[in-house]
Image (cartoon, rainbow, N blue to C red):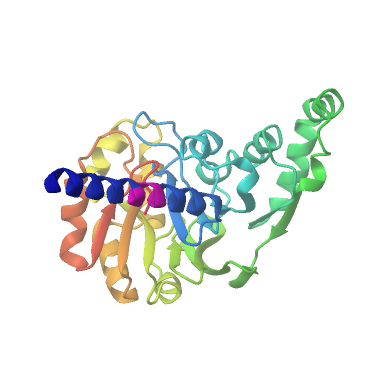
Amino acid sequence: MIDSMRRRLVLGSALSSLALSATWNRARAQLPSRHTRLILLGTGGGPTPKKNRSAPAQVILVDGVAYVVDCGNGVGRQLALAGVKFSAIRDVFITHQHSDHNADYGNLLLLAWESDLTHPVDTWGPPPLAKMTKAFLELNDYDIRIRTADEGRVPFAPLIVPHEISAPGVVMQDERVKVTAALVQHPPVVPAFALRFDTAERSIVISGDTAPSDNLVALAKGADVLVHEVMHLPSLEKLIASEPNAVRLKEHLLAAHTSCEDVGRIATAAGVRTLVLSHFVPGGYPYLEDAVWLDAVRPYFAGEIIVGRDLLEV
């Protein structure tokens, strides 16, 4: 009798706790997110579409607001797969004007407008960002006019507000984040920038495409997370053998990108907490296991190393 009563009391208490927990979880779900999230949308290097990695892009979410960094091909679909609403986008950043980083700059915003975007988005990047924006609007004028009239959408052109970046320093600051740019070396593309995002909770640095850079080391000093491009030198010959412009491509890769060893050295010099490898070269063929990348970087950096993959949240 007593045991039966005790079981009922325990069960009642457990059910009460579960009910309270469920109520608390529902309440939390209705509150805005109060932490900084980083999602790698695309981690392949180069403009050629790949089976295993999407083109370069990432999104930083602060209090549920989305800051997109780079717009490689397919970035809109990657955002959808990551569960990020297009209406969450407030700012879009382009680190440099190379097609694997800007191919879907206009498309992202057009598709967002055709989804649920109704507010202006500030876009930031090197020249000719303003000219690119104008040309994209002209290219898609027919579709834009049809959808505006037929579907009752707000005018599209006023929703894109481009800002050209030509020099290092603080690029943008709002109530959630401060964004600082540093010039990096990615010949022959000039200017090319790395970007640092400082929020109340975390500091995240995106290298963009770069050869080893002292400016990047300075920008990343003490950062919580450094997302850095990476190139596996021993695998370049197989990659080059599959390309028709092999000689010129090899010259570019060696002059404009960063080896595994140097990525580790940069992270160590900057004193970052976590190093995230991304923009892999090679990013498709030849395919390299995660352990290959990790083993190549580990001797040069003692902190946490994450081998990036598409849609990974860090």
Q: How many marks?
A: 0
Answer yes or no: is residue 239 visible: yes
Residue 252 seen in the figure: no
Q: Residue at x 32, y 48 (%)?
A: 308
7 lies left or right of 185: left
Tell me what residue is drawn at x 73 percent, y 38 percent.
Answer: 136
State left or right for residue 218 relative to residue 300.
right
Task: Let me know if residue 54 is in the magenta part.
Answer: no
Q: Quadrant of the N terminus?
A: top left
Viewer-nearest residue: 110 or 38: 38
x then y, percent, for residue 268: 27, 72
Outermost residue toward the right in this view: 149
Q: For the C terminus, which image quadrant? A: bottom left
Q: Is residue 154 above or below residue 128?
A: above
In-image side of 246 versus 195 (left or right): left
Point out the residue furthest to the front here: 1
> Is 17 covered by the magenta stretch?
yes
The boundaries of the magenta stretch are: 16-21
Horizontal side, residue 265 vs residue 38: left or right: left
Rendering quarter of residue 220 = bottom left
Q: Nearer the viewer, residue 206 or 287?
A: 206
Give the residue displayed 64% in from the left and 36% down from the top.
Answer: 107
Q: Position of residue 21 (x, y in %)?
A: 38, 51
- Nearest the camera: 99 or 277? 277
Foreground: 34 or 138?
A: 34
Choose top left, top right, bottom left or bottom right for residue 237: top left
Residue 50 in the image: state x and y as whole percent.
Answer: 39, 31
Q: Position of residue 125 (x, y in %)?
A: 63, 57
What main secondary structure does the magenta stretch of the protein show? helix
Q: Examine the rendered structure and indicate whether residue 194 appears above or below residue 99.
A: below
